[in-house]
Amino acid sequence: MDNVFEELKALGFRNLDKIEIFASDVKQKTTDELQKKQGIALADILYDKTYICPICDKVFTSKAIRSGKNRLMSVDTDLKPKYDTVNPSLYECIVCPKCGYAALSKIFSSVSPKQMGWIKEQICSQYKERNYPEVLTNKDAVERYKLALLNAMAKKVKDGEKAYLCLKIAWLYRELEDSDQEKTFLKYALTGFLNAYNHERFPIFELDELTVAYIIADLYRRFEEYDKALQWVGYVILEKSVSLRLKTRGLHLKSLIREEKMSKIETQNKDK
């Protein structure tokens, strides 16, 4: 298996090639290009937010997105959003530049004393200090999310949290047009969400039970497991408590799954 944490070697981490995320189991735009493309609008959207690292107590700032300044343009079938100016996911993962502790902004301060010990032993002891540019690229974000995933594993978090991080990483690889790595992390996300659905309480971050079921359906579709995809999306559509927005998405997804299934059957028949 390829080392999915390859980028973290530069941060001092070794022997990650055989690490398992779950027990069960392109052209990159430069910072200058991004600044040129986004111009003054990006400066208006980003601001410095102060954090205190719960592991080493370092006070530092990390860029964040101003609310109401970034317009949603479209949403992929697996709920990956596309915005008009900047991808918020680039700035949702916070990294302490001193000790290497990393997590999503909404849970950055949520660390138990036992987890602190695990992070110091497994992360801080190997981490080499890294300063990121103010304007992050997708490649920078991939590194930061993978560091957050490694921290999540050190903290022994539930599979749902790891699945959420894997889904975010897959979306970043989609931006980079790296389909192989995208599929790798979509597969991890599917495994983790299935585990979470059977054993964890919802919500998982902002994802409720039906939203996770919908994502599972679309992930099965992306791996051409159409019968399983139809079962999961059918559950979403038929659930009485489903929101109108999610039901509409589910009906569209069901139609897409059927179209792709029929196309595959027709192709297979022609090849016989």
Image (cartoon, grey):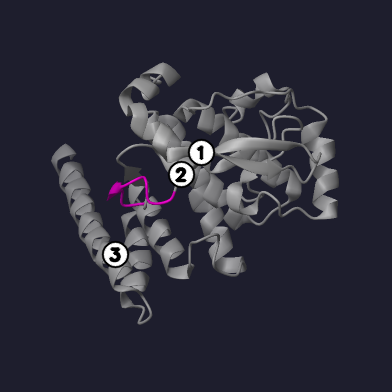
Q: Residue at x 74, y 44 (%)?
A: 154
Q: CA distance from mark 1 to mark 3?
A: 36 Å
Residue 141, can we see it?
A: yes
> How far from the left and from the top, in percent, is residue 205?
55, 59
Mark nearer the N terminus (2 vs 3): 2
Q: Quadrant of residue 171?
A: top left
Q: Is disc 1 surrounded by few (<14), some (14 to 19) or many (20+) residues within 10 Å?
A: some
Q: Is disc 3 surrounded by few (<14), some (14 to 19) or many (20+) residues within 10 Å?
A: many
Residue 25, can we see it?
A: no
Q: Amino acid at mark 2?
A: Leu
Q: Which residues are magenta?
A: 67-78
Q: Is disc 2 surrounded by few (<14), some (14 to 19) or many (20+) residues within 10 Å?
A: many
Check disc 2 and report the residue beneath it: 186
- Element under disc 3: helix
Q: CA distance from mark 2 to mark 3?
A: 19 Å
- The number of numbered discs placed on residues in the rendered structure image is 3
Q: Amino acid at mark 1?
A: Tyr
Q: Are marks 2 and 3 in contact (CB under 8 Å)?
A: no
Check disc 3 and report the residue beneath it: 250
From the viewer's side, name the closer residue of 262 and 239.
239
Q: Quadrant of residue 245?
A: bottom left
User: In the picture provided, is 64 more to the left or to the right than 173?
Assistant: right
> How far from the left and from the top, in percent, is residue 179?
38, 32
From the viewer's side, name the closer residue of 257 and 239.
239
User: In the picture provided, is 25 more to the left or to the right than 18?
Assistant: left
- Element under disc 1: strand
Mark nearer the N terminus (1 vs 3): 1
Check disc 1 and report the residue beneath it: 47
